[in-house]
Image (cartoon, rainbow, N blue to C red):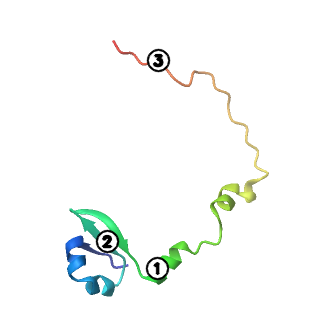
Amino acid sequence: MNITTISSREFNQDVSRAKRAAGPVFITDRGRPAYVLLTIETYQGITDNKESIIELLAMPEVAELDFDPPHLTQALYRPAELS
């Protein structure tokens, strides 16, 4: 996958160059990545997930999993020493 990086100034001056790029186009603002330009096919490939987050978290395939966590023997925290 070919990734192109251009500044926001370059993007504003030549939008067609960004649109012609083969892969995702990272648009930087003051040298830091700020935006990503994707083709509609790439975007749909990323977002066309048939499962919802609830279905993914439910994990029905492990419903019969035996889980016996160990009991805590120590405190969860210690007071901070400020001296």
SS of the residue under disc 2: strand
Q: What's the mark number on residue 17?
A: none
Q: Is residue 17 left or right of residue 69?
A: left
Number of disc labels: 3
Decide: is 59 above or below 19.
above
**Mark 3 lies on residue:** 79
Q: Residue at x 64, y 72 (%)?
A: 50
SS of the residue under disc 3: loop
**As rendered, which of 70 and 33 lies closer to the eye?**
33
**As rendered, which of 70 and 25 lies closer to the eye?**
25
Q: Earlier in the sequence, mark 1 or mark 2?
A: 2
Decide: is 64 above or below 12.
above
**Mark 1 lies on residue:** 42
Decide: is 35 above or below 60.
below
Q: Are marks 3 and 1 in contact (CB under 8 Å)?
A: no
How far is the residue under mark 3 from the one under mark 2?
46 Å
Q: Residue at x 33, y 85 (%)?
A: 19
Q: Is residue 27 left or right of residue 55?
A: left
Amino acid type indicated by mark 2: Phe
How far is the residue under mark 1 from the one under mark 2?
14 Å
Amino acid type indicated by mark 3: Pro
Q: What's the mark number on residue 26?
A: 2
Q: Quadrant of the C terminus?
A: top left
Amino acid type indicated by mark 1: Thr
CA neighbours of label 3 inside 10 A, class few (<14), some (14 to 19), many (20+): few
